[in-house]
Amino acid sequence: SKLSQLAFARNYSRKDFAFVFDIDGVLIRGKDPIAAATPALELLNEHRVPYILMTNGGGVSEKAKADHIAKIVGVPISPWQIVQSHTPLRTLANDRKHNRVLCIGGVGDAVRHVAKSYGFEDVVLPIDIVKAIPSISPHHMFKQDDFDKYAIDIDVNVPFRAILVFNDPRDMSTDVQIVQDLLNSQDGVLGTKRKRRRLEDPAIPIVFSNSDVYYSNEYSLPRFGQGAFRIITEELYSHINQLRPHEAMSSLLCGKPFKLQYDFAHHVLIDWREMLITNKFEQPKYPLLGTAPTASPFKNIYMVGDNPASDIQGANDHGWESVLLRTGVYADEDLSSLEAQPTAGVFNDVYDAVLEILRVNK
Ligand code: G3P
Ligand code: MG
């Protein structure tokens, strides 16, 4: 809205540092805000320091995510400030090779709308396949109401060109089955089985948008994330294909901690700063997948996260500063045994971290 653009316009900045915040375990836990998030973001708005949010979550549009976080935290957030695990996948949509895609994860048919908005044309969900061929997943959990609401009628003979795991599976048993069917099919056709085994390359490419084995919600212990589905998928694929111990299923990985995601977020952060300066809030030109910005106005980018294996590891690997919080996944771990040590320290919460970093950058 005009009003929230005005609010952003005030925040324009020519500062040479910026923040990238993780979402789950930093700003929110499940449906609840983390109390420190509101004053932290307000303080940055006041000091005109640019920031974006980079989450390994997703399953909805960037606009829906921005509105959701803004509502919980009570601070305006623009869709152009959001990088979800699958946001970079929009750059693959023009690739004709990815014509019919199977999209995994998310609630109802939400990811169909997301994939279509990214430009994918023939977007199929497991529920569409189960509706057409119920025996493909004998223990599926879909109700008639789900089929009525979310499924579309498809020609099941059209080959699939890729599998895109957008978000955590909801009916894990169906997703496990159908994904393996396609990975081991003859050229992506359902109901076929390729003859050759021991191949590290599956029959069609699979993209995992998030490799977090754990994430933090309202529960007292970390919960399994999409990374758990990746492990199951890889293990089953190795088993079916009799791969040797040093062999592994090949896949494309995005999300934190991978370079691809940090490069993409860096572009988004630069674009966001530009929007704040010019006061023009339009869809930015998204970069080619895997290209780092050639020049950056930022001397330091602070990645503030709760998950050492993704947030901190990625920041350290790709030249950003890293800040670890005690409000999420990390809470129960021992700092000295961490492989990825935060370069800018460990803090109780996001407000403490922001205060200190503003002080250091005065
Ligand atoms: O499912 C989401 C989770 O894996 C991570 O979310 O915001 O902590 O990167 P976030
Ligand atoms: Mg997190």
Image (cartoon, grey):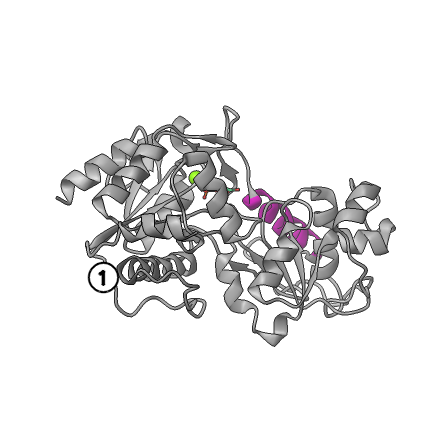
Asked if the magenta segment contains residue 269, the reply would be no
Q: Which residue is tagged 1? A: 297
Which residue is pictured at 30% across the width and 36% down the height? 40
- Estimate how packed mark 1 is, as few (under 14), some (14 to 19) or many (20 or more) residues with alpha carbons within 10 Å: few
| In this rendering, position of residue 359 left or right of residue 24 | left
Q: Nearer the viewer, residue 109 or 102?
A: 109
Q: Nearer the viewer, residue 168 or 357?
A: 357
Prevailing SS of the magenta stretch: helix
Where does the image place residue 31, in percent across and percent down from the top left? 52, 32
Q: Indicate the amino acid at tag 1.
A: Pro
Which residue is pictured at 84% across the width and 44% down the height? 138
Q: To which quarter of the image does residue 272 belong?
A: bottom left
Residue 328 position (above or below residue 303): above
Q: To which quarter of the image does residue 249 belong?
A: bottom right
Q: Quadrant of ligand 2?
A: top left
Q: Nearer the viewer, residue 206 or 21?
A: 21
Which residue is pictured at 52% across the width and 55% down the height? 86
Asked if the magenta segment contains residue 236, the reply would be yes
**Number of numbered discs overlaid on the protein picture:** 1
Q: Which residue sits furthest front? A: 2
Where does the image place residue 251, in percent across and percent down from the top left? 56, 60
Which residue is pictured at 71% across the width and 66% down the height? 160
Figure quadrant of the C terminus: top left
Q: Element at badge 1? A: loop
| In this rendering, position of residue 245 left or right of residue 276 | right
Q: Please state the extent of the stretch shown in magenta in the rendering.
A: 226-240
Q: Is residue 352 among what the camera can see?
A: yes
Q: Nearer the viewer, residue 87 or 45?
A: 45
Where does the image place residue 87, in percent across and percent down from the top left? 49, 57
Where does the image place residue 358, in percent across and percent down from the top left? 19, 41
Q: Which residue sits furthest bottom? A: 96
Q: Is residue 345 among what the camera can see?
A: no
